[in-house]
Amino acid sequence: MAAPLLLDLALAGITVGSAAALSGIGLVVCYRATGVLNLAQGAVAMVTAYALRQTVVVWHWPRVLAIACCVLVFAPGLGVLMDVAVFRRLQRRSAGTAETLVAGIGVFVLLVGAAALLWGLTPLGDAPVVVGSTLLLVAPGGLRLTADTVVELGAVLLITAGVAAVDRWTPFGTTVRAVVDNRRLAELSGLDADRVSSVGWAFGAFTAGLTGVLLAPGLRLDPYGLPLLVMETMAVAVAAGLSSLPLAVAAALALGIGQSELTAVHLTGWAEALLQAVSANLFVLALVAAVLIPGRLTGPGTTDPEPLPSEDRTHAVPGGALRLTGALVMLIGPLALREDDLRLLLPGPGLGLVLLSLVVVTGYGGQISLGQAGYAGLGALLTGAFAGGAVPGLPALSAPLSLLLAVLVTAPFGLLVGRPAIRRRGLALALATFAVGTAINRLVFQQPFFTSGLLLDRTGAWADDRAFYAVELLLLGAALLLVRALRKGRTGRALGAVRDHEPAARAAGANVPRLKLLAFTVGAALAALGGGLLGLGSQAFDPDAFDPVLGLVWFAAVVVFGAGSATGAVLAAAALTTVDAATAAGVST
């Protein structure tokens, strides 16, 4: 490979890596100032990119003015609003990681939903360019240096140096360290902890907005794509242990350059497809590797053992009878509707099974899982593979048998993910499950090699929508009975003990690793069953139906309706499905 080509690719990679570095810097600074990992970083980037397009393309503002207003005013203001309206009160009462994590996901979902309502779900390809690729210099050998590379890398270095200087040589840096070390003690000493928190959130939102407006012109702007892309850049912050800015910048540039250089490598056959998948998803793979390295995350909240506050630790659920009645009406009612209306509500029971899997893993087991969409997608994909005869050595099977085999094959994946995750809790576990779910989506669901030959047609008794919906309800009812038996028995009590206080449960003789693996395995099986029903309901495999962003939406919905309530999961599924059926797909987010 010619040296000039390698250098040109490296420069192109620096442009991508610089944008990732900006996002990583914001995540690290915000985490160091507040103790909260901003999971809404990608959503802030997306909303800022939409705001810039609105001001430039729709309202015809001067480009420079629009960029200044969106990046320097709108994005930081959004960060301060997030702090004042959501996170400040959590910090004042020393809320645990679970609560702040749920709050971050809630903000993420709110911003994505607002963008979908304001600008629609249709991808837009006219995002304004902030820094053009104007040619600045042609070096000897044909090396081309462009303006976007120089400006973006310069911004990264300048911001990094500025943050380091403030942290080391100013009284504010000392205040930040004092507040992070012990907020209550710092407040008793007369320090303004709220101001430190607001500055951290404003700076994090500023870098998120800058990342969004830089990345948007190279993409088709939509409410889902950019947030997930920016969340992938979380790999650089995790690789830096959520503490070191130089490590975050170095990791971002290395990944950006590596991703660019891999595009010049050409292989043949399946190796070429594998190389392309790795090249396109290098940040995802880096995130998986970073979160699975033992001890990589050691900051505050990364191993927080606190359970979710909304998990209904008592056996009685407030308004349980009313919730159960509402769930039954919303699920059984569609059987009385016309065929066309019933078809819109077919996903309800399947989604209910997916959300029920979150109740088992998170509500009963106390393990935060953001990757259930991956298991659900595997259930749909394997159901189609068995039904379509795409599994070597097996003929095409009936839909019911294909669904059963898909569940049996997917369940052990819960063991594969759960085994390295059983030593993690809190933020570390959440990131690990999200990373794995994202990797499954990008490396499996988005690859034609795995999705070709799938057949999700419903033939025979399941061809009729009404009959298929009745089967879905029966399977959901059976799953509810299984989950109830699990919770009421000795195993359920042991899971509750692990959830409430893992060290005490271990001291009492509970086999904590086995219980955690059981929760992950049962959760994977239920999610796969629900995903298979979702695929059969739509009679097609759609990778976007199992997007990691939707996994966050599902997690948030379960928490809102009660993470420890099986009835709440069913009610949440019915509500999400009804909203989408009554309006437009995706509005429920």
Image (cartoon, grey):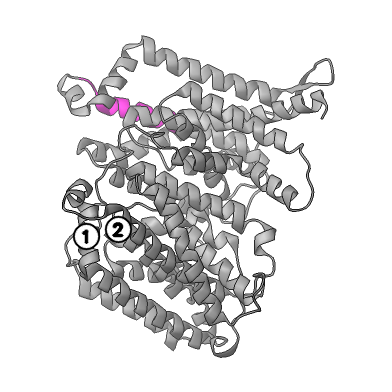
Residue furthest out toward the top: 169
Q: Would you say the residues marked 2 and 1 are in contact, meaning their CB atoms lie under 8 Å apart?
A: yes
Between residue 543 and residue 589, name the one nearer to us.
543
Please give the range of residues in magenta. 191-205
- At horizontal 78% and vertical 42% (from top left) the residue drawn is 266
- At horizontal 47% and vertical 67% (from top left) the residue drawn is 528
Q: Reply yes or no: does residue 198 show up in magenta.
A: yes
Where residue 477 sits in the image (x, y, percent)?
Answer: 35, 79
Distance in Å between CA atoms under marks 2 and 1: 8 Å
Mark 2 residue element: helix
Mark drawn on residue 494: 1
Where residue 215 sits in the image (x, y, percent)?
Answer: 61, 37
- Asked where in the image residue 126 lies, by quadrant, the reply is top right
Q: Is residue 247 above or below residue 432?
A: above
- At horizontal 59% and vertical 82% (from top left) the residue drawn is 398
Residue type at numbered disc 2? Leu
